[in-house]
Image: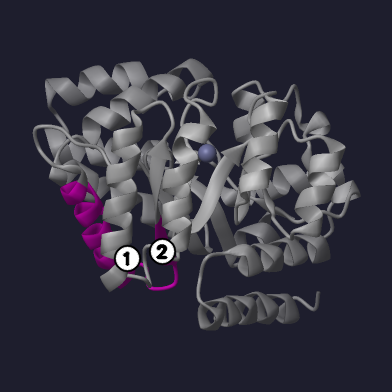
């Protein structure tokens, strides 16, 4: 099964750029920025290149430090694409919150990421990359307004690359209603919306979000059975990130993951990594966990991948080509 999943031309729809760098890539990035024998790298390595959960969360801080320069951000973006390409991911939508500091503005940030994706395209031509600028709900509304304005403006010339907006950040902070008008503006301008929804148990906010609408629902951990039926009626997929949910503690264990309920309800779903680097996983590994835990067959894994193709924000032609790659792979294995 693992070999089959590794070879499958997979589709990743829920990946945060900064969290998607694997341990090796983090080391490469640190070496490039600080030099392989620098005191700084040794210090960071000793602290953070350990595979345990505390170290995982520590690495968020570390990654922010590594990507706080234009060079670091550019190289990190390329490495994130490399990691997905190495896992045979044929399509990935990267999400990232534009940041500003003494080295770059939010506009620069997005431009650096766009340029890096372009460069990565030459190195990893089999992996198609799209970008979703993120709104971090813990930041002020004015920042979200700037992010959406930049996304709308840049999408005018790069509608092939900037395809949507993500709403994320600590779900215990910020009010969805404060961000709804900004998200509505993005939607009016043709951007799709991928919204982190029901990550924590907050039924009134889930109701607001579902009334507002979205193209895809991130996590959906605390959706009620009625909510799942509603999403099914509206053909809105739930982006299920198994390892992320278990390691971050919103789901007690894999067996109790809501993917089971979603499959039983025959509602739309996709399997995603969320932060593959932070949670030390890959999309292959996430499929394997889903297959082992819920008894998925090869055929079901193919179907899940085709479901992800259909719910991607890629163009019709791109979706057609992705589906063909999956079909070709399945036919060579006679699945
Ligand atoms: Zn996420």
Q: Mark 1 points at which residue?
A: 155
For residue 153, above or below residue 156: above
List x then y, in percent, for residue 259.
Answer: 78, 42
* Part of the protein shown in magenta: 107-131
Q: Which of 39 and 123 is in front in this view?
A: 123
Query: CB at mark 2 closer than 8 A to ligand 1?
Result: no
The quarter of the rendered structure image containing the N terminus is bottom right
**Mark 2 falls on what kind of element?**
loop
Measure the alpha-carbon separation of dots 2 and 1. Answer: 9 Å
- Rendered residue at 59%/23% (across/down): 248
**Mark 1 falls on what kind of element?**
helix
Q: Please name the predominant secondary structure of the magenta segment in the image.
A: helix
Verify CB contact (< 8 Å) between mark 2 and mark 1: yes
List x then y, in percent, for residue 154.
Answer: 26, 62
Q: How crowded is mark 2: few (under 14 residues within 10 Å), some or many (20 or more)?
A: some
Q: Mark 2 points at which residue?
A: 189
Direction left: furthest residue:
102
């Amino acid at each position: 099964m693992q070999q089959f999943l590794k070879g499958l031309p997979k589709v990743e729809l829920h990946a945060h750029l900064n969290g998607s760098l694997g341990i090796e890539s983090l080391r490469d990035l640190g070496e490039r920025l600080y030099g392989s024998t620098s005191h700084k790298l040794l210090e960071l390595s000793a602290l953070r290149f350990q595979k345990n959960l505390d170290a995982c969360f520590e690495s968020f801080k570390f990654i922010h430090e590594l990507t706080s320069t234009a060079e670091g951000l550019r190289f990190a973006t390329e490495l994130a694409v490399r990691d997905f390409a190495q896992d045979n991911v044929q399509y990935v939508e990267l999400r990232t919150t534009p940041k500003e500091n003494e080295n770059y503005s939010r506009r620069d940030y997005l431009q650096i990421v766009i340029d890096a994706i372009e460069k990565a395209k030459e190195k990893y031509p089999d992996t198609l990359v799209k970008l979703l600028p993120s709104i971090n709900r813990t930041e002020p509304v004015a920042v979200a307004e700037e992010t959406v304005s930049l996304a709308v403006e840049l999408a005018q010339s790069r509608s092939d690359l900037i395809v949507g907006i993500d709403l994320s950040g600590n779900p215990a902070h910020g009010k969805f209603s404060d961000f709804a008008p900004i998200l509505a503006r993005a939607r009016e301008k043709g951007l799709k919306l991928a919204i982190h929804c029901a990550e924590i148990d907050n039924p009134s906010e889930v109701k607001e979000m579902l009334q507002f609408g979205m193209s895809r629902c991130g996590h959906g951990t605390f959706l009620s059975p009625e909510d799942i039926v509603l999403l099914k009626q509206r053909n809105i997929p739930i982006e299920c990130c198994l390892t992320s949910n278990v390691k971050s503690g919103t789901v007690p264990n894999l067996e109790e993951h809501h993917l089971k309920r979603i499959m039983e309800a025959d509602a739309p779903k996709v399997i995603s990594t969320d932060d593959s680097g932070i949670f030390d996983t890959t999309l292959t590994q996430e499929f394997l966990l889903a297959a082992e835990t819920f008894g998925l067959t090869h055929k079901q894994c193919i179907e899940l991948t085709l479901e992800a193709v259909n719910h991607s924000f890629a163009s019709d032609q791109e979706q057609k080509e992705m589906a063909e790659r999956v079909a070709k792979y399945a036919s060579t294995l006679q699945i």
